[in-house]
Amino acid sequence: MHIELFLLDNLIWVILCGFFLINVFVTPNFLIYDNIINIFYHSAILSMLVLGQGLILLTGNIDLSIESTLAFAPAIAMLLSTKWIPGLDPVTTIFMTLAVGALIGLSNGYVVTKGGINSFIHTLSMLIILRGVTLFLVPFAIYQLDKVYIFLGSARTVANIPVAVFLMLAIFLFLNFVLKSTPFGRFLLATGGNPRASFISGVNTDRMVIYAFVLSGLLAAIAGLLAAGRQDAINNTMGKDMVLLSFAGAILGGASLFGGRGTPLGMLGGALLLGTISNSLTLVGINVFLLYACYGVLIFVAVVLDRAKVKLRELLFHRESIRKLKVSSLEPA
């Protein structure tokens, strides 16, 4: 049973390895070094949104505003440093970008917990509001960004590996440690798994939900920094249509729609799977509209997979319970 549960909990890596091996044989130029680096590089931005969405799902909520936060946070920070408070250094602008993302997450968390508004409804409204404000404030792209500001998204290191890849891996490993080995992580998982029991046990569940939304906003802002660096510009369409992919990546990576289950490393696998699928379909020359349709199929598959994993887990525990009952019945009184 332990092996079956392990495979079930790490199913995303089995799927990713299988899909990778298939592409090695059927997709031209897939295994070359530059293409593998390209998969990781182009997965970095989406992975931040997948992780942010996954943390929210752990609490039993959902955050639809992250794709708009991705564009809004760097846009506001850059306008502050160039027009509203000219002369700000790029390092301060980076921290302002992160602060804007965190503040959006903080407001989302407070409205959901203290206002009692459903997270889907509230973050949907924020998705539209933030995108609309970004379209108004940044009608045209902002070019010629400072080299320091775009460093995380554009710089390369040894063996031509982008800094964004190392940043992505560091964030996932750090948060995986936090969730597995700290009281904060246990409280966060407990909040989504059984909020009533957690509250009775002394966990401030509202505070944990707020923390999750703050982290989600912060990760969306980091994704905005990476996107701005990759294209050396800030435009009002950054992150568009990525929120559903973040949802799919988190669910594929092991996060549950019902909260309380999932790991950052699993979510990383979900993001890399989406990046690998996009890369392979592009290499074989699939039509862009069919690629978009494939994303829709992936979202459907993610939801079905989540339900199937819940059923399989229940079946495994049921079988184990029956086995223990049989063993106990055979033991002498």
Image: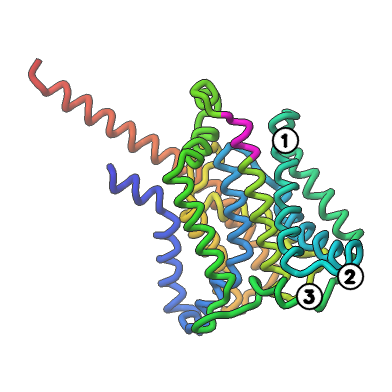
Identity, as a three-letter code, of the amino acid under mark 1: Tyr
Residue 31, visible in the rendered structure: yes
Quarter occupied by the N terminus: top left
Camera-nearest residue between 161 and 330: 161
Identity, as a three-letter code, of the amino acid under mark 2: Phe
Camera-nearest residue between 39 and 162: 162
- Residue 194 lies, in percent from the top left, at 51, 29
Q: Quadrant of residue 165?
A: bottom right
Residue at the disc numbered 2: 140
Q: CA distance from mark 1 to mark 3?
A: 33 Å
- Residue 122 lies, in percent from the top left, at 76, 39
- Residue 181 lies, in percent from the top left, at 42, 45
Disc 3, SS: loop
Q: CA distance from mark 1 to mark 2?
A: 33 Å
Residue at the disc numbered 3: 145
Q: Which mark is residue 10?
A: none
Q: Quadrant of residue 84?
A: bottom right
Asked if the residue under mark 3 is in contact with the one under mark 1, i.e. CB atoms within 8 Å, the reply is: no
Residue at the disc numbered 1: 110
Disc 2, SS: loop
> Which of labels 1 and 2 is toward the front?
1
Q: What colouring method underlies this structural image?
A: rainbow
Q: Earlier in the sequence, mark 1 or mark 3?
A: 1
Instruction: State the extent of the magenta-drawn residues as a range.
Output: 204-210
Camera-nearest residue between 330 and 152: 152
- Residue 156 lies, in percent from the top left, at 58, 80
